[in-house]
Amino acid sequence: MKNLILFLAVVLGINTAALAQDKRMDQKIKTITLEQIPGEFTKKQLTVPEGTYLFEIVNKGIDHNVGFVLVAKGKDPSKPENHIQTAYVTAPVGTDSKEMSKPTKLTKGEYIYFCPLNPTATDNTMVVE
């Protein structure tokens, strides 16, 4: 009887783990590619659905490293505590190369993005619906 209970507990545990993994697989991570040229981003406005995103930042011909900063609209972008830090690229983006951010969950609202190293304006907007 003990073996039967142990067997059922193991089977139930495996099923629960498989279902949880399937649920995570349904929440796909999408990539947003943003290209920087000297002094600006080539895309100045974006509209995306709520979800989890990776930001791929491309340095197109800028002769030094660039980065990426994302801030909820209305917050002071000059204060690092207002930056969505998971959206930072994981390494500086060298000339004619690209780097990725960590997965970043975006909820409904408006955001601004910019690069202080390029430097770019802080009027690039992203609307999350």
Image: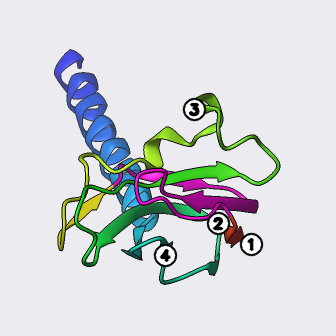
Q: Earlier in the sequence, mark 1 or mark 2?
A: 2
Q: Earlier in the sequence, mark 4 or mark 2?
A: 4
Q: For the point 56% across and 43% down, which residue is it?
A: 84
Q: Residues within 10 Å of mark 2 (few under 14, many from 20)?
A: some
Q: For the point 61% across and 28% down, which residue is it?
A: 81
Is 104 left, or right, of 18 in this rendering?
A: right
Q: Which of marks 3 and 1 is nearer the N terminus?
A: 3
What residue sits right under mark 3 in the picture? Answer: 80
Above-or-below relation of 2 to 23: above
Q: Where is residue 5 in the image (x, y as percent from the top left)?
A: 28, 24
Magenta span covers which residues?
Answer: 101-122
Q: Which of marks 3 and 1 is in front?
A: 3
Above-or-below relation of 109 to 97: above
- The secondary element bearing badge 3 is classed as helix
Q: Is residue 120 located in the magenta-colored stretch of the structure?
A: yes
What residue sits right under mark 2 in the picture? Answer: 50
- The secondary element bearing badge 2 is classed as loop
What residue sits right under mark 4 in the picture? Answer: 41
Distance CA(mark 3)–CA(mark 1): 25 Å
Q: Nearer the viewer, mark 4 or mark 2?
A: 4
Q: Which amino acid does label 4 sit on?
A: Phe
Q: Which amino acid does label 2 sit on?
A: Glu
Q: Which of marks 4 and 1 is nearer the N terminus?
A: 4
Q: In which quarter of the image is residue 34?
A: bottom left
Distance CA(mark 4)–CA(mark 3): 20 Å
Q: How crowded is mark 3: few (under 14 residues within 10 Å), some or many (20 or more)?
A: few
